[in-house]
Image: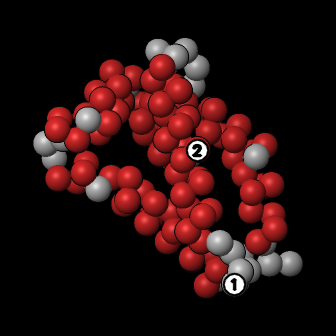
Amino acid sequence: MNFSGHIERDGLKLCQEWVRNTVDPELVEAPYNTDKLRADIDSMKGMIETGIKQGELTDGTPVDALAVALIDVIYGEMFCWDMSGGSYSFEERTKEFCRLFLPAMIRPYINK
């Protein structure tokens, strides 16, 4: 939720420019943008692995698949927000996802 809130507060035009530049690798100037997707997936994996280490998630949690799926969702939400011209709140859309759909995705892996 913090990710989408920061993107929304930075503004639609900046987000659209970032998406345009990262989709076309020839436009990427900053080195951190070339590995942004990998860095975000690794960050998500780290959060999931922390949940496993703390005993909140089971050892059988599919860390890689879950991390990629969640990043796919947040990037997809960001792209749709861009395409809509910011006609709704990206942050609220992410909160809605987390409230309605995220629990179903992680429920099988929650340690009881």
Q: Is 52 rendered above or below residue 39?
A: below
Q: How many marks?
A: 2
The residue closer to the viewer here, 35 or 93, is 35
Q: Is 100 rendered above or below residue 89?
A: below
Q: Quadrant of the N terminus?
A: top right
The residue closer to the viewer here, 22 or 47, is 22
Q: Residues within 10 Å of mark 1 (few under 14, many from 20)?
A: some
Q: Earlier in the sequence, mark 1 or mark 2?
A: 1
Residue located at (37% from left, 59% from top):
38
Left or right of 44? Residue 112 is right
Residue located at (53% from left, 26% from top):
80
Q: Is 100 rendered above or below residue 56?
A: above
Q: Secondary structure at mark 2?
A: helix
Q: Amino acid at mark 1?
A: Asp
The residue closer to the viewer here, 98 or 31, is 31
Res. 28 image quadrant: top left
Residue located at (47% from left, 15% from top):
85
Disc number for residue 108: none
x and y, in percent, of residue 96 in the image: 71, 37
Read off the residue under disc 2: 73
Residue 18 visible at all = no
Name the outermost residue toward the left: 29
Q: Amino acid at mark 2?
A: Val
Read off the residue under disc 1: 59
Residue 22 visible at all = yes
Left or right of 107? Residue 9 is left
Left or right of 41? Residue 109 is right
Q: Secondary structure at mark 1?
A: loop
Name the outermost residue toward the right: 112
What colouring does the structure picture have?
Answer: secondary structure
x and y, in percent, of residue 58 in the image: 73, 80
